[in-house]
Amino acid sequence: MTLPNESGVMTPAQLLEHWQGHRRLTRRVIEAFPEDQISTFSLGGMRPFAEMVMEMVSMAAPGVQGVASGDWTMRARTVPATRAEMLALWDEATEEINTLWPRIPAGTFQESRTAFGRYEGPVYQLFLYMIDNEIHHRGQGYAYLRALGVEPPPFWERG
């Protein structure tokens, strides 16, 4: 079922730029982590930040691919050995998102889809969930960085 977008609050291009701003900031958080702590440090029983990053990588581009093509294959990724390898995967996902996004017709954002066989809802809500999930995990990364004595990047700088 397609619902009309009567509000005109945000275009697909604006949503992508908003998300990519968050992705640029999350990338800087990954860069800020000490190499020897990104895959091992945790607080309060939470996962190490590297595992959270790989969750985001496993969902982001595959989510856009699912909407664009109907192929909802989630790509399980193991945590890379180095931060540089993790950043390379992050950058690959960013490029894939940028390549696939224009293939999504504007009306699709109001249509319902079932992402990865389990998350049903309008496409725009699926993307908002991915953005919210990234923000949530980035916040955990900020707490880790502060606990490690590392000043995280300013959260408002997404450029």
Image (cartoon, grey):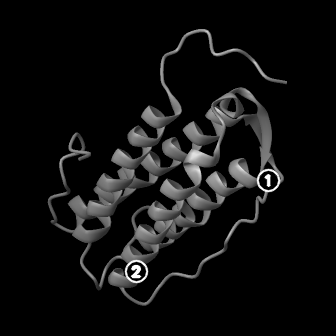
Label 1, label 2: how far apart the Cα atoms are: 36 Å
Q: Residue at x 39, y 48 (%)?
A: 20
Residue sticking out furthest to the top: 6
On screen, residue 22 above or below 10: below
Quarter where residue 61 is shown: bottom right
Q: Residue at x 75, y 34 (%)?
A: 121
Q: Is residue 147 left or right of residue 84?
A: left
On screen, residue 70 above or below 9: below
Where disc 1 sits, the SS reads loop
Q: Earlier in the sequence, mark 1 or mark 2?
A: 2
Q: Residue at x 18, y 47 (%)?
A: 154
Disc 1 vs disc 2: which is toward the camera? 1
Three-letter code for the amino acid on which mark 1 is drawn? Gly
Q: Is residue 122 left or right of residue 154?
A: right
Q: Is residue 85 left or right of residue 68?
A: left
Three-letter code for the amino acid on which mark 2 is drawn? Thr
On screen, residue 138 above or below 155: below
